[in-house]
Amino acid sequence: MSYARGMSVDTAIGKRKTDSTGSPLGVVRMDAGRSYAGVGELLQQYINTSDKNVWARIRAKIDHTYNRLDLALAALDEETRFGAEIKSRVDEGRKVLVKPNVVTAYDIDPQTHGPGPGHYACTDWPFVAALMRWLHDRLDISYHQMCVGEAATTTSAVAGMFSMWNPEGERVTTEAVIEGRAGGFYGGWGFYFVRKYLAESHDPSHWDDPMQGYEDSVAGTCIPPGHAADRLMVYDLNRIYDDPTKGRDVEVPDGVNYSSITLHKAIVGGEPGDPEDIKAYPGCVLVNVPKLKVHQITPITAAVKNLGIGLYPMEAAEAEGSFRWKYGVPFNKVPGLKAGIPHAKRTAAVDPLTGFPERDASGDYIVTESAGILATMADVITAVRSQGVFMLHVVDAVEAINLDHTGNRPGTREGEGLAVAGLDPVATDLLCARYLFSNVPLEEAYRTGIDDGNGGRFPQKVPVPRVEGDSIVTDTGYDCPLSRDGSYRYAEERGLGARDYYVVGRDAVTDTPLASVGGRLGAVNSGRFSEIITPTLYYDIFKMPWDLQQTSFGYFEAVDTLAGSSLKKEFLEAFDEDGDGVVRYDECGRKGMMGPILALMANRMSIEGTERYGYHHGSFILNSTLLRLSNPQWNAGGHDITKHFFYGVASVTAYAMSQLGLEGQDPFLPTLTWGKGKWPSFQFASYMQVGVMLCGDGFPLRVGAGGLYGHCFRYADVTQNEGRYSGTVLLQPDPEGPHRYVTEVASGAVAPLDFTLYVPAGYGSLGGSTIPNVEETDDPARVLTASFAGGSEVW
C-alpha cells in the first residue's frame, strides 16, 4: 500500500507538500451506494419475508464496507501500530468495548420494520458489523473478547415504549432495544443483525460464536465482562441504579465542571485495590464509533461528542433507591435526557412540573453558571483516560446526517462515502468538521482569506440575503462556522489531543492514495492533488444563526432596513455575551435558555416511555411549551425566554420560503414578494413558522401532517375512534388523516372528535374555514393547551 505523506504535489494553488506532521488519520472514501446505503429498506424486506436473497444483498454491502474499512485502518496501523497495542491489552484480560452512537434508538420501526426515526441519527449497524469483523479478522481478537456498550439518551424511554407495544406482552429491555430484536418483536437499533452477519462471516470451526450473549440482552442480564468469557455482551452503560456496584466514582484530573464522575465499570474497570472487582471488571479498550452529523448544540457529532456526552450514565442515582439522578432528568423511573450535565455556560432553573423557568424573589431567572458543554465533554474523557483506557476512534461518515441529528423528519442522509480513523479525537474531529463545513474548492478558499480559527482555510459557501429595491434577494457569500467554534483549541488545552494531523489511506472510488494539504482531504494521482469536498450545505435547523450566521444576520439586516425593525440588534443583545458582534457556539444567552429547552426535551422522552400514546402527548408538551415561552402573552408568567431563539427558527422558515419555485405577495409587508430566491418579511416568516407548528406542513392551505393539531387529533383518533384516520402504524401515521378528518367534519359526514386545541388569534381558520376542534383565545393560561373528553384530560 502506497501513501502520499510529505511529498511535493501540484495543487490548485501551486506546488505544496502533503501534510506529514501531527496525528495520523486513516481515511477511506468508498461508494456509499455499494456500502450500507439502502440497508434499512432491505432489512425491512428481510424481516417481513425471510427472503435469503435479500439477506445476501445486505451481507454483500457489509462485505464491501469491511473491505474498504481495511484501507483506512491498515494505513493507520502502519503509522501507529495501534493493533499491537490493542492486542496486548486484550491479552491482559481487557475487553474491546465498541461504543456506537445510538441517539434515537428506533432505527428499526417496531411495526413496519422499516427505517424508523433513528435511521437519521444513529451509527449504522452495518458499519459496526464491518468494523467488528475487521477487529476479529485482522487483529485476531475473538468476538468473546469484545462487547458493545452504550449510554444512549433514548434507550430507557424506547424500552418503556416498546414494552407497552410488544404484542407478545413481554418487557423489552434496554439491551434488547440495542439488539433490535426481542424474541419475535423487532424494533430498536440492530445489533442482533450485527451478530448474525458476524456469525455467518467467520470460520464455523471457531468457538467464539457471536450469537452467544443475545439471550442475556433480551433478559436484561448484566454479566460483568470478566465473567463473560464465553459470550459477546451488550452493556447498558446508563443503568447503574439497579446495582450500584456496576459503577464507581472516578476523579477528574484538573476537572472543571466535575471533580469526579460516576461511570460504568465496564468502561473504567473495577475498584483499585479490590482484586475480585478488577477480575470482574478488568477495564476496556474503547473503540469509539460515532456517526458524523450536525448537532443541535455543538457544531458536529464525532469522536469527542460521542464520548463527551455519551459516557455519562443517565440512571446513576444520588442515593441508593432514589430516582434523583446525577446526570439525567426528569427525576422518575424513566429519565429522558442527560439534561443534568452542563450543556451551556448559563442554565435557568426549571419547574419540573411545567417546564417553565423559575424566578427568584426579585423576579429574575435563577441561573446556574458553569464552563459549559466543552468542559462537560473534556471532563468525562479526561476521567476515562486517567484510568489507562486506550481509545480508537472510527467515524461513520459513509452517510453523514444533515439538518437534524435527532431522527426528526427534516434530517437527511448525505452519501459522503467516508470513514475516518484516528487515535487522537481532536485531530479526528477537526478533519471531520472541516470536511462537513467547507464546500469551497482550494483556490477559492484561499482567495477568501478566511481563517477557520485553527490555522486553516475552510470557508463555507452560503446564501446571503440582501436588499435590492423593495425586495430581499439571495446572493452567495462565505461563512466559516469553525471560526466561531473554540472546542478544538479548548480540547487541545485540556490535553485530549492536538489539532495538527496528516491523512493516510485510500480513495477506493478512484483507487488512488489519500493525503491532506493544509488539513484538506484529497487524492494524489501522478503527482497531482485532487481535493475531495462535499457538495452539500450542512447546518442544523435548530441553530441556523450559529451555523449559518452570515445568512441569518443578512436576513435580519435586510428586514431591519425595509421594516425599520431591530432584529439583529435584539438577537445580539440576547446571545452575544462578549459584545463583539459574533455569536459563538458556546454563547447561548444570559437568561439560561437551554435550561427549559433541555428539560422539556427530557420530559418529552420520559412521557413517551411511560404513556402508551406518549409520543403524541410528549411532542405536544415540548413544542407547545417552547412556543408559549417565546411570547409573554402566551403564558401566565409573562415569560419570553425562548423569544430570540425563535428568531432563528423564523430565519429557517424564511430561507425555505425563498427556495420555493413559486412567488407570493407578503401580507405583512406588501412591497415584498417571496419565493424564487426572494425572502419574506420577518412577520410573515414568523406567522408561517407558528402556523406550521400548530397545523403541520400543509399550513396555510390545509391541515397537514405533524403540528400540535396533528398530535391532538391523532391522540383523540386512537383513543376515541380506533385510529380510523391515523391507521395502525403508530410512529408513522397516515399523513392524509388530519385533512380527511377536517374535510369530512366540514361536510357533515362525521361528528367531531372530543378535543379542543386553544390557539392564538389568527390561527383558528384556514382559507376562511374554521378548523374543527380549534378555539382561538387570548387567555395566557389556556392558549396553546389542549383538552380531551369534555375537559377530563388537559395537555
Image: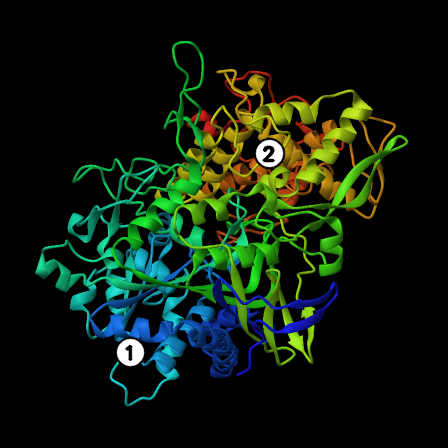
Residue 440 image position (x, y, % from top left): 71, 56
* 566 up-or-down from 509: above or below: above
* 94 up-or-down from 464: above or below: below
Residue 741 is drawn in which quadrant?
top right
Whether residue 773 is visible to the viewer of this picture, yes or no, is no
Residue named by callout 2: 583
Q: Is residue 158 left or right of residue 668?
A: left
Residue found at the far right of this picture: 469
Q: Amino acid at mark 2?
A: Val
Residue named by callout 1: 142
Residue 611 is drawn in which quadrant?
top left
Residue 31 image position (x, y, % from top left): 61, 74
Residue at the (86%, 27%) spot, across then down: 670
Residue 717 image position (x, y, % from top left): 51, 42
Q: Is residue 248 left or right of residue 298?
A: left
Front-most of 498 and 433?
Answer: 498
* 564 up-or-down from 580: above or below: above
Q: How much space separates mark 1 and mark 2, taking CA atoms? A: 49 Å
Q: Is residue 399 left or right of residue 661?
A: left
Q: Is residue 468 left or right of residue 94?
A: right
Number of numbered discs on residues? 2
Residue found at the far top of this picture: 362
Instruction: Please rate how many residues cluster around mark 2, counting C-alpha atoms within 10 Å: few if below 14, some from 14 to 19, many from 20.
Output: many
* Mark nearer the viewer, 1 or 2: 2
Residue 113 image position (x, y, % from top left): 47, 64
Element at label 1: loop
Front-most of 452 and 707?
Answer: 452
Whether residue 490 is visible to the viewer of this picture, yes or no, is yes
